[in-house]
Amino acid sequence: MSADNLDAESQVRDLIEGHAKFLSGASGGTRADFRNGKFSGADLSGADLRQAFASGADFSGANLSDSDLSEAELAGVSFRGADLTRVKLIDSHCRGSDFEGAKLSEADLTGADMRPARISTSFREAGTPTNLANADLQETRITHTNLAGAVMTGVKATRASFDDANLVGVDLSTADLEGAKFKGSDLTGAILRDVNFFGAILVDTDLSRADLRACHLDGADLSGANLDGCIIADGMEDLDPELQVAVFEHFVWIASGGQRGLRAELSGADLSGANIGGADLSAADLTNANLQGAKLGRCSFRFTRFDGADLTGADMSICDMRGVVLSNSALQGANLSQANLSRLAIIDTKTGRLSREWPANLSGAKLISTSLARAVLTGAVMDGTHLEEVDVAGADFSECSMDGLMIIQTKMQNAKVPPMP
C-alpha cells in the first residue's frame, strides 16, 4: 500500500462492499469508482468488480488474482507487475493500459478492447499503446480481443489462445508463443522478430506485411495463412529478383511443412555480399555457392548444405546451424560467434519420440581468422578441419569428433574441448 494513502486498504474494502450491493441490486449499493486512484500493492484478490470504473488508476504490484473485471472501464490503468492470475477481463475497456511485467496466466481477455488510449489519464498519454511487455500470458484466453498496436515484446504466452483476435501492428518481438493458437487472427503488419512459434496454430491467420525475421516456426501449422508481403529477411528488396523468389518460396515451404512453396536449390549460386539476415533457409541446398561477405546473421540453417561453399568474410553470427553441413567449405574471416552448431534432434512424426541426432559436419572445412567465440559445436564432426588463428573464446566443442584436426595458433584452452588422445 502506498505511503501517501494510509487508508487505501479501508477504501478498497468499502468500494468492494458497495459494488457487491450494486451488482446484486441491493439498497445502498454504489458502482465502484477507482478512477485516478492510487492502489499500488493493494489486495483485491477474488473481488467481483464487473462494470467498475477504474480509468487512470494505479494498480501496479496489486494482487488482483481470481478477480472479475469484466466490462470494467480500465483505460490508461497501470497494472505494472500486478498479479492478474486467472483474472476475468471479458469485454473490458483497457485502451492504453500498462500491463508490463504483470502475471496474466490463465486469464480471460475475451472481447477486451486493448487498442491505444483515446484520451490522456494520470499515467498514460492519449495515443499511448497498451503495454503488455514481458507479461506472463501462459494459457490465457485472448479470443476476439482487440490488441491492435499493443506492445507485447517478450511476453510468455505459451498455450495461450488468440483465436480471431485483432493483432494488427502489434509488437511481439522475442515473445514465447509455443503452442499458442491464432486461428483466424489478424496479424497484419505485426512485428514478430525472434518469436518462438514452435507448435503454434496459425491456421487462416493474416500475416500479410508482418515482420517474420528470425522467428522460429518449427512444427507450426500455417494452413491457409496469408503471407503476402511479409518480411522474412534483411535487405530482401536489394536481392536479385530470382533470389528474392527463391528465398520467399523456401520460407513458404518451411512454414507450410512442405505443402506449399519450393525448397531453395541454390547450388553454385552467386550470393556474394547478399543481405538475407534473419531468413530461414533450413534444409536449403547451397553447395559450392559463393557467399563471400554475405550478411547472414540470425538466420536458420538447420540441416542446410554448404558443402564446398565459399563463406569468406560472411557474417553468420547467432545463427541456428544445428545439423548444418559445412564440409570442405572456406570460412576464412567468417563470423560464427554465438552460432549453434550442435546436434539437430530428429523427431519421429508418428511416435513424437527422438529418432536420432544429426551432428553438424565441418570435416575438411578451413577456418582461418574465423570467430567461433561462444559458439556451440557439441557433437560436431571436425575430422580434418583446419583451425588457424581462430577465436574460440567460450566455444563448446564437447563430444566433437576431431580426427586429423589441424590447430594452428588457436588457443583451445579458452574453449571447452573433449579430452585429447
Image (cartoon, rainbow, N blue to C red):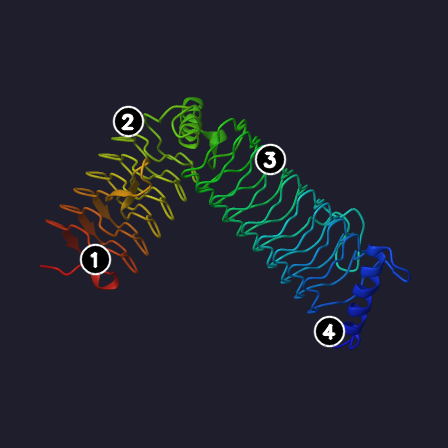
Q: Which mark is residue 410?
A: 1
Q: Of 126 and 112, which appears nearest the observer?
A: 112
Q: Nearer the viewer, mark 2 or mark 3?
A: 3
Q: Are marks 2 and 3 in contact (CB under 8 Å)?
A: no
SS at circle 3: loop
Q: Which residue is mark 3?
A: 185
Q: Which residue is mark 2?
A: 267
Q: Going from the N terminus, do you reach mark 1 or mark 3 first?
A: 3
Q: Going from the N terminus, do you reach mark 2 or mark 1 first?
A: 2
Q: Residue at x 13, y 45 (%)?
A: 384
Left or right side of 230 for 300: left
- Crowding around mark 4 (Cα neighbors within 10 Å: few <14, some 14 to 19, many 20+) is few
SS at circle 1: loop
Left or right side of 133 for 237: left
- Crowding around mark 3 (Cα neighbors within 10 Å: few <14, some 14 to 19, many 20+) is many
Q: Residue at x 23, y 38 (%)?
A: 329
